[in-house]
Image (tube, rainbow, N blue to C red):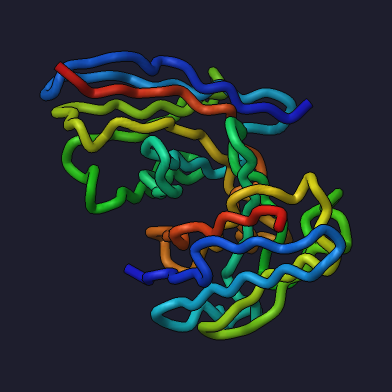
Amino acid sequence: EVQLVESGGGLVQPGGSLRLSCAASGFTFSTYSLNWVRQAPGKGLEWVSYISTSGSTIYYADSVRGRFTISRDNAKKSVYLQMNSLRAEDTAVYYCARDGRVGGYPYGMDVWGQGTTVTVSS
Amino acid sequence: DIVMTQSPDSLAVSLGERATINCKSSQSVLYSSNNKNYLAWYQQKPGQPPKLLIYWASTRESGVPDRFSGSGSGTDFTLTISSLQAEDVAVYYCQQFYRTTNTFGQGTKLEIK
């Protein structure tokens, strides 16, 4: 079964740090790009970050650039999100999502994890 | 960034009736190299992650019922549910992946009338 499982969420104080992990199974991890997408309580979806298959290409949303770092370990079939200088507005469910490709062209995020909850509060 | 605007914000439709959700992008998401619109639709039910329904504006993801269809090109897109079923109650999002900084619409909440 194709699966993504996030972990590492929790309660953290403003200004603190947290590292999220996303473990993949059921597909050839090294051949897919990955994304982190978040959803604040009662709000819509916000794309956070993207990492290419090798990790050589990385993008961030303006709201997290300079504070968050995405990385991956293809040997461990995992992608990570290091979150520093956390703010109350970073409170959200964080999803890991696979970038689907057909014939080499992207077609959206075709596999999603169940999410891990990050709460930033004093 | 490309801004995605959905309408309406919420919608109530009777069972068996048609539901239509619109999505407008602030610039074209038509990729000239393959003539594909880099526009996807997702369904999110309470307590669940989003599920990809439609990609390239009009291609149904595997396993998605054929009552779901997508149309449009360039900057204007539509998701149509031809005959609403109870299990279709959800929030629907459009997303552009034309730019590397993906953006989602604000979501449309679909309910039963």
- Nearest the eye: A1 or A45: A45
In the image, is residue A75 above or below residue A47?
above
Residue A31 located left or right of residue B71: left
Residue B40 located left or right of residue B86: left
- Nearest the eye: B107 or A5: B107
Quadrant where the N terminus of chain B sits is bottom left
Residue B35 coordinates in the image, percent (x, y): 65, 82
Name the quadrant containing residue B69: bottom right
- Say which residue appears at 36% left-offset and 45% top-offset: A48
- Say which residue appears at 74% left-offset and 26% top-offset: A26
Residue B30 located left or right of residue B82: left
Residue A39 coordinates in the image, percent (x, y): 42, 40
- Say which residue appears at 47% left-offset and 42% top-offset: A35
Residue A81 located left or right of residue B36: left
Quadrant where the C terminus of chain B sits is bottom right
Residue B56 coordinates in the image, percent (x, y): 67, 69
Residue A21 coordinates in the image, percent (x, y): 44, 21
Q: How many marks?
A: 0
In the image, is residue A118 above or below residue A67?
above
Residue farthest along the left direction in this orientation: A15
- Say which residue appears at 39% left-offset and 79% top-offset: B26
Name the quadrant containing residue A37: top left
